[in-house]
Image (cartoon, rainbow, N blue to C red):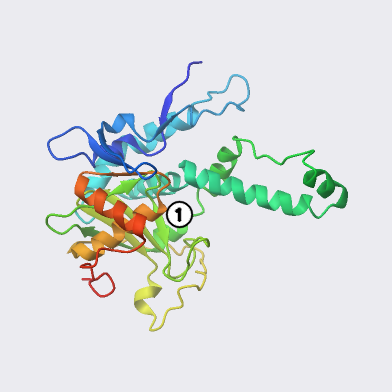
Amino acid sequence: MGSQQHHTVSRIYLEGFCIPSKDRVAVLDLKTGEIRQQKPKKILRQHDYFRQRHAPEGKDEFILEEEMGQRIESQLRGIIDKLVLGGQGLAEDELITFILHLELQRLRVPKQALFAKSIAKGLIENVAYSIPGVAKELRKGWYEIKIKDEFRFTFLRNMTGKLFPYIRRMAWDVWEAPEGYSFITSDNPVTIFNTRVHPPDVAGIGLLGSTVLFPLTPHHCLELTHPEVETEENPDFLQPIELKPFDVGYVHIRAGRIMTENIAYLANCLVGTEAERYLVGSDINVLAEVHEALKTGRPRPDRNIETDRK
């Protein structure tokens, strides 16, 4: 069976970030600083990324890519169009499909796969180095612990469904970009952050203060927050959320509010911070400004991002 090009980030999603009047997006390479214009079908893809070479004989090695395309990505454009309108006309099955897309998009990118492999390797090494004979052989370099690539699929299978109950209970805000500004996305487009968690620590979605950002289009960004942040007087951002049976409720999508330019800029910087290598957008100037902030580690002097929030 021949090789295939697989998009690590949905091509249909990326098409929504095309430069006005063009069929191309602007792509910033964080490693080189180069910005180029490319067609969405040509970016954020890898040969046979979803090919399961470990599949039993007779089984379709490309079944994951095919299923995602048929069941999720074929509906994605229409669902996003409804979300930017505040969920008008959004059916329950479409909502479930979109949440599944968020889960898979978060988990399937190379950055998250590498993170999962590093955790697994660390756990195995901790056990191995606790065994005197094995530890000696490892230190001498006689053996090396490696995590096979097929672990990505085990990770994807085991984690799918774990984010769903959190996302379903969260408050959904669809923000509009201010006039003359736009949102960007990346090769790791589902950003989870918590202002009380600082690198190298990683914020999980299960902490009360964790927020999910997912740019829907250059003009709209989805922000998910735990409802306790709004209802509790002094919320503890590091408090774990205790999920309860049937703790899902009805997803209320709030739309129509406009982010200030400074907060939209901050959102873009957060997306950029979580990227592995590439940022994607419809405005070269916005990409360049975010890149400068990421390089210097500080915002532009005229951007008051601490208090400027609508």
Q: Is residue 201 left or right of residue 137?
A: left
Q: Residue furthest top?
A: 1
Residue name at image x 63 percent, y 24 percent? 56
The local secondary structure at tag 1 comes to helix
Image height check: is 223 above or below 101?
below
Badge count? 1
Residue name at image x 55 percent, y 42 percent? 157
Residue 67 coordinates in the image, percent (x, y): 43, 32
Task: Name the residue type under label 1.
Answer: Phe
Query: Would you identify the image quadrant in which residue 71 lies?
Result: top left
Q: Is residue 150 left or right of residue 130?
A: left
Q: Residue furthest bottom?
A: 233
Residue 300 coordinates in the image, percent (x, y): 25, 63
**Mark 1 nearby-residue class (10 Å; few <14, some 14–19, many ≥20):** some
Front-lying residue, 37 or 252: 37
Front-lying residue, 181 or 174: 181
Q: Tell me the residue that label 1 is attached to.
A: 164
Residue 275 coordinates in the image, percent (x, y): 40, 49
**Can residue 253 be seen at all in this image of the molecule?**
no
Q: Is residue 149 left or right of residue 309?
A: right
Q: In the rendered image, which quarter contains the C terminus?
A: bottom left
Query: Would you identify the image quadrant in which residue 9 lies?
Result: top left
Residue 178 coordinates in the image, percent (x, y): 15, 59
**Can residue 57 be seen at all in this image of the molecule?**
yes
Residue name at image x 53 percent, y 25 percent? 61
